Image (cartoon, helix red, strand yellow):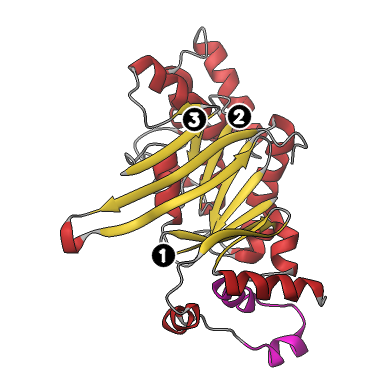
Amino acid sequence: MANNQEVLVDIKNLKQHFGRGSHKVKAVDGLNFQIYRGETFGLVGESGCGKSTTGRTIIRLYDATDGEVLFDGENVHGKKSKADLKKFNRKMQMIFQDPYASLNPRMTVSDIIAEGIDIHGLSKDKKERKERVVELLETVGLNREHANRYPHEFSGGQRQRIGIARALAVDPDFIIADEPISALDVSIQAQVVNLLKELQEEKNLTYLFIAHDLSMVKYISDRIGVMYFGKLVEVASSDDLYRNAFHPYTKSLMSAIPHPDPDYERNRKRVTYDLQEHLREMDGEEPEWREVSPGHWVSCTKKEFEAYQQQLQTQ
């Protein structure tokens, strides 16, 4: 991660509500966090917590219900001209969860990858376009022979590499990777994550990496945000979160991570998060965003905050 801590993406009170009245679903309900240039910010939580909706709202696939997304100081959801939107779309790209559904089956790999190149006029002729496609294929571990094939001719891991090449084609600054490995075989997941890490170093990319697998998120992320029912409950550096998880929901996620030691696995105790019990313990006090230790933020009551700090002192 870059040491200058320059904020590239600033999310302020972001809300994404669907439906109306009693049928309203608060998929994202008041998120506040920042992503620094050059880092990977991991966003984790169980299915349905709102993490994918967060990614899609940041990149403006959904219009935000409320709040702001500032990208390089500019409001993503403000009124934009076509030229402004085109410029923004080049700077921010997305890698989707399902590498097959996100690729047009009627287009060749060459045309899929070059779509952004064509839209933004990034090649002066067909020869340069072809050279750029081949370069991108080789960058993601494929080769020039793959250019004229169709998506169905590739494995899941190869299709995801094509999706990554498509995202890279316009030289973005920021990539949202929305569950990019969850549809892949376990044997292929590490290869794709390692590719993303290598590309980040080579091209100074910034990632929002969305996933439910905490062990993989720890491997790739500099900082991690934990989501529960549309809200962030904890944000910390990757190492700090694993060493000192405070929020009971985060602890429940941590307890579910498998361990390679068979003896540990036999004796491992799962922690379950009971929201109603937690609400009773809070005794009517609304949780606030508090910094328990430098850079480690938790949504908690004053009583919980004091208990967390006591916990740190006794270590």
Q: Residue furthest left?
A: 21
251 in relation to 58, above or below: below
Q: Residue furthest top?
A: 124
Looking at the picture, tell me which residue is in the foreground, 134 or 67.
Answer: 67
> Comparing marks 1 and 2, which lies closer to the viewer?
1
Give the residue number, with chain letter if any, for mark 2. Answer: 136
Amino acid marked by disc 3: Ile
Secondary structure found at label 2:
helix
Q: CA distance from mark 3 to mark 2?
A: 8 Å
Check whether the beta carbons of the residues at disc 3 and disc 2 lie within 8 A of each other. Answer: yes
Q: CA distance from mark 1 to mark 2?
A: 38 Å
**How would you rate the neighbour count of disc 1 (Cα within 10 Å): few for under 14, some for 14-19, many for 20 or more?**
some
The dot on residue 229 is: 1
Q: CA distance from mark 3 to mark 1?
A: 35 Å
**Upstream in sequence: badge 3 or badge 1:** 3
Q: Main secondary structure of the magenta part?
A: helix
Looking at the picture, tell me which residue is in the foreground, 303 or 211.
Answer: 303
The dot on residue 113 is: 3
Say if the magenta span includes residue 260.
yes
Amino acid marked by disc 1: Phe
254 in relation to 235, above or below: below
- For the record, the magenta segment spans 247-269
Check whether the beta carbons of the residues at disc 1 and disc 2 lie within 8 A of each other. Answer: no
